[in-house]
């Protein structure tokens, strides 16, 4: 099947959508045939840059096309679940960027649609694919390392609603439903154990953005492992998420695709996978799952327990 081009559409031509387009360029037998964006002129510019023939501002136009086998959704969070279901109902495989949803009921509906159609549906939980976290996962699966505690910091400095390219967003980011989703899923994935206890507190609500700018989350897995997650949009300094794995045989510090031991000595993870780019690896898994007709890593069914925990935390915070 690899000899048959897999024709992919991308919805959401912003900063993160372009990261996917960069990754897809490196995958053999993949052709991006349609690009969906909010503003037609800007979307046409991106399409010209990447050589994409069809441009639209309406996802339905793309879903009606015969030259689209699968869709990657990099649209605003509030649209994810509804659009993922629309893709599946149109007979298209779908990868939806994190978060899958901003309500547990919507996440459940996406999983039901996937079961009904039997198509590939996955969510962009990139941490599962970063070589740094893959290295730790390999040690866990081999029985050489068990997570006893994860200490995670997710820090940004945000005063206005801008994306990674410094452009205004059409939606508002969220510490719980977006940024905590990465860690809650990764904690359950790496401990191979379901969260049985979860607590959260949050700071003041921002008067303009309408969201909490600081949050603290505690998790406990069924196997006894614990996780402490600190999130802030108020941090002035290094931005991003930094993971400390404290285990029975070692300590690992993961910073995106880089990995260090507890003494801050760098670990070579360049041979863990075919690339050092987590987004590209995520897209490779999506393509491979479609071609091999199998469930992908980070399928919507696999990540749903994460959103159940987020739902419980949201109820606590309210």
Image (cartoon, helix red, strand yellow):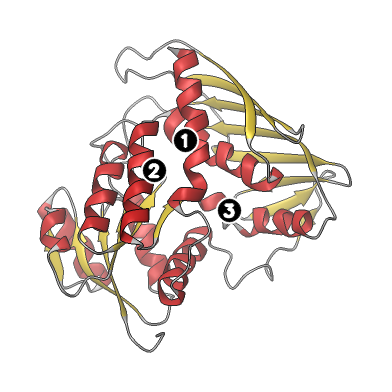
Q: Are marks 3 and 2 in contact (CB under 8 Å)?
A: no
**Which residue is rendered at x = 33% and y = 37% of the image?**
106
Whether residue 219 is situated above or below residue 125 in the rendered picture: above
Checking the image for residue 3, the label placed there is: none
Mark 3 and mark 2 lie on one chain; the one further toward the N terminus is: 2
Residue toward you, 137 or 27: 137
Whether residue 66 is situated above or below residue 236 in the rendered picture: below
| Residue 75 percent across, percent down from the top left | 28, 47
Question: Along the horizontal axis of the image, is 54 left or right of 99?
Answer: left
Q: CA distance from mark 3 to mark 2?
A: 15 Å
Task: Please indicate, yes or no, whether residue 140 appears anywhere in the rendered image.
Answer: yes
Q: Residues within 10 Å of mark 3 (few under 14, many from 20)?
A: many
Residue, disc 1? 307
Quarter occupied by residue 63: bottom left
Q: Quadrant of the N terminus?
A: bottom left
Question: Along the horizontal axis of the image, is 52 left or right of 158?
Answer: left
Disc number lying in front (3 or 2):
2
Q: CA distance from mark 1 to mark 3?
A: 16 Å
Task: Please indicate, yes or no, whether residue 165 appears anywhere in the rendered image.
Answer: no
Checking the image for residue 128, the label placed there is: 3
**Which residue is rendered at x = 32% and y = 12% of the image?**
207
| Residue 118 percent across, percent down from the top left | 36, 62
Q: Quadrant of the C terminus?
A: top left
Disc number lying in front (1 or 3):
1
Mark 1 and mark 3 lie on one chain; the one further toward the N terminus is: 3
**Which residue is rendered at x = 28% and y = 41% of the image?**
76
Mark 1 and mark 2 lie on one chain; the one further toward the N terminus is: 2
Q: Are marks 1 and 2 in contact (CB under 8 Å)?
A: yes
Name the element at disc 3.
Answer: helix
Q: Residues within 10 Å of mark 2 (few under 14, many from 20)?
A: many
Name the element at disc 1.
Answer: helix
Residue, disc 2? 100
């Amino acid at each position: 099947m690899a000899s048959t081009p897999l024709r992919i559409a991308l919805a959401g031509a912003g900063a993160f959508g372009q990261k996917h387009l960069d990754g897809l360029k490196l995958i053999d037998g993949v052709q991006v045939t349609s690009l969906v964006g909010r503003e037609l002129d800007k979307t046409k510019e991106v399409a010209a840059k990447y050589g994409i023939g069809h441009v639209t501002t309406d996802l339905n136009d793309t879903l009606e096309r015969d030259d689209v086998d699968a869709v990657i959704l990099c649209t605003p969070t509030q649209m994810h679940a509804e659009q993922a279901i629309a893709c599946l109902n149109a007979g298209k495989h779908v990868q939806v960027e994190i978060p899958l949803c901003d309500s547990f009921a919507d996440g459940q509906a996406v999983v039901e649609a996937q079961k009904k159609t039997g198509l590939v549906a996955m969510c962009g939980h990139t941490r599962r694919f970063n070589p740094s976290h893959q290295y730790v996962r390999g040690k866990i699966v081999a029985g050489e390392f068990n997570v006893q505690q994860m200490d995670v910091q997710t820090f940004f400095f945000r005063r206005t609603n801008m994306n990674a390219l410094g452009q205004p967003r059409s939606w508002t980011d969220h510490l719980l439903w977006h940024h905590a989703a990465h860690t809650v899923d990764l904690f359950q994935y790496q401990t191979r154990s379901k969260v049985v206890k979860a607590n959260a507190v949050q700071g003041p609500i921002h008067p303009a953005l309408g969201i909490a700018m600081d949050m603290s989350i505690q998790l406990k897995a069924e196997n006894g492992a614990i996780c402490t997650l600190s999130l802030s949009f108020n941090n002035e300094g290094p931005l991003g998420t930094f993971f400390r794995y404290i285990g029975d045989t070692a300590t690992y510090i993961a910073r995106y695709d880089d990995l260090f031991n507890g003494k801050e000595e760098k670990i070579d993870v360049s041979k863990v996978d075919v690339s050092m780019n987590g987004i590209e690896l995520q897209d490779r898994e999506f393509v491979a799952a479609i071609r091999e007709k199998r469930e992908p890593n980070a399928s919507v069914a696999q990540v749903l327990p994460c959103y159940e925990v987020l739902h419980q935390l949201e109820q606590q915070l309210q």
